[in-house]
Image: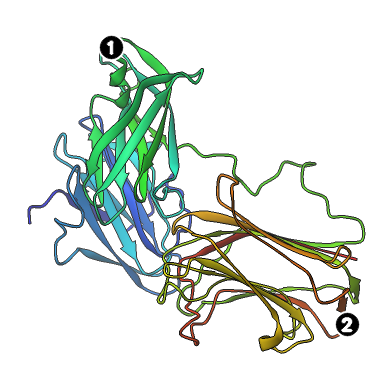
Amino acid sequence: MRKLTCFLFAAAVLIGLASSPLHAGAVYVPIDPMASDDQVFVSVSNPTAEQVNFTYYLIGQNVSGVDDRPDELPIRFLDPGQTIVLRSQLPLGQRGLLEVYSAAHLPVTARLGKVDDTFESIMGPSVPVITSDNAAQGGENLYLQGLQREVNGTISSNVRLVNLSKASEDCNVTLQNSTGGVLGGFINLPARPSLSVSAFDDGLVAVLGNADAGNVRARFSCTGPFYVYSVSHQPHTEQSVFIDAAANTDSAFQPPGLEVPCPAGAFCFRTDGVFHVPVNGNKVKRLEFPTPPGDYNRLHVNLNVKLANWQTPSSGLHNIFWLALDRNRNLIGYVNLKGPNANTVLFRHGFGQPQEDKAKVTVPAIFVPGQTYNFDYVFDTNIGAIDLIIRDASGQIVAQIFHSPDTNKIRVTNNEIVLMDFGFLGINPNEPPTFGWEYSNLTMTIQP
């Protein structure tokens, strides 16, 4: 197996490299210098009190990181509190994608930089670090904005498409100008190699023909998980500039004064962002909602769940939530999904009854791994109605269940508390843990 690059290691913190915690697993860093003296500095830190390790592997541009993967990868050890800086020294024109993997939660950041004649590091702009959080899943869209091309060739936005799937995948792109006009039509891209980064060296905006172009927006979609970014060399500043995939306003944050108010006399709870991702040792998340004693008539729950893979059996129950007053005997709501070979939503509820006597409702629905779904649940004894609505990321209703509560109130006594569980322990073989599923942005309102 030919070597693509070598790395120098320094056991010191590189000033100016910020870090942010990531989920344990693999991250990918573009190694994409545009100038001959550009280098990419990758900082990997150990914030724990124990020694940890990580592996690294440089995947060459347009090369499969699956098919051409060596049997053994280099491994590095990090002492407690230590930061290692990896400085790539690539042959001119050699580019790729650096994989960094650890079972521990290690902060990883990357910067472009140069080394001057005295071997001092001169830091430049940030380089994207690709994770499962900022990558798109198959069928989702990612946008690049502010792409440009000058006919004389001094500036060109060179787009890179990262296939994060372990198989080849097909992608497409649509280009639009700042007024929304479509440029060049719908473009199907050649199949991308598995786990790879592919370059469009002339810039995608070259489809515009012999004309300058600026402020172009590109929408990408692929059949599997992917990421896109752009890099260009600015001759006036002698710097390379990265354009990262665009963020969007699908955010749990609200400006001051625009938060949804809690109704008078109600008790409101919320968790912003991801609050549970089942893993071994933490398969089930329990939340407690301290509610003062009294009679309540309306409970409203809303949350998002991003599905990972279906577990075995795929037709088994995959838990969204279990909601009860103190224990299962007073079950306010219980929602589960079943995958291939079943493709249904299973819902149950019931007060003061054993499990076998509780109401049970199933409706057909197909859910796609990698997609995020919104679950909106209302239990209202005032109007005698239960309403569960499940929507996909576009807001389309995937499934809906109407039913009637078998109680005229939710009575909370001094010794009771409202509980919610998310996920299964896997003790029952028909109730597998929902490994990798992301539960986020939970709100609950309990009203008299």
Q: Position of residue 441 (x, y in %)?
A: 64, 57
In the rendered image, the vertical position of residue 425 relative to residue 184, given as above or below: below
* Position in image of residue 395 (x %, y %): 60, 46
Question: What secondary structure is found at the residue carrying circle 1?
Answer: loop
* Amino acid type, callout 1: Val
Return the x and y of residue 443 as percentages of the image width and height: 71, 59
Colouring chosen for the image of the structure? rainbow
In the image, 411: left or right of 325?
right
Q: In the figure, residue 205 lies in which quadrant?
A: top left
> Label 2: how many residues lie within 10 Å, few (<14), some (14-19) or many (20+)?
some
Q: Quick check: 425 left or right of 304?
A: left
Residue 42 is left or right of residue 256, and the answer is left
The answer to whether residue 127 of the structure is visible from this angle is no
Say which quarter of the image contains residue 238: top left
Q: Nearer the viewer, mark 1 or mark 2?
A: 2
Q: Nearer the viewer, residue 365 or 284?
A: 365
| Viewer-side residue, 257 vs 208 | 208
Name the residue rendered at 17%, 42% in the picture: 90
- For the question of whether residue 136 can be seen, the reply is yes
| Rendering coords of residue 152 (x, y %) | 26, 11
- Rendered view: 173 above or below 421: above
Tell me the quarter of the image containing the C terminus: bottom right
Verify CB contact (< 8 Å) between mark 1 and mark 2. Answer: no
Q: Which residue is mark 2?
A: 413
> Which numbered disc covers residue 419?
none
Question: Which amino acid, mark 2?
Answer: Thr
Quadrant containing the N terminus in the rendered view: bottom left
- From the viewer's side, name the closer residue of 242 and 329: 329
Q: Could you say which disc has been placed on residue 151 in the image?
A: 1
Q: How many marks?
A: 2
Residue at 27% x, 10% y is 210
Nearer-N-terminus badge (1/2): 1
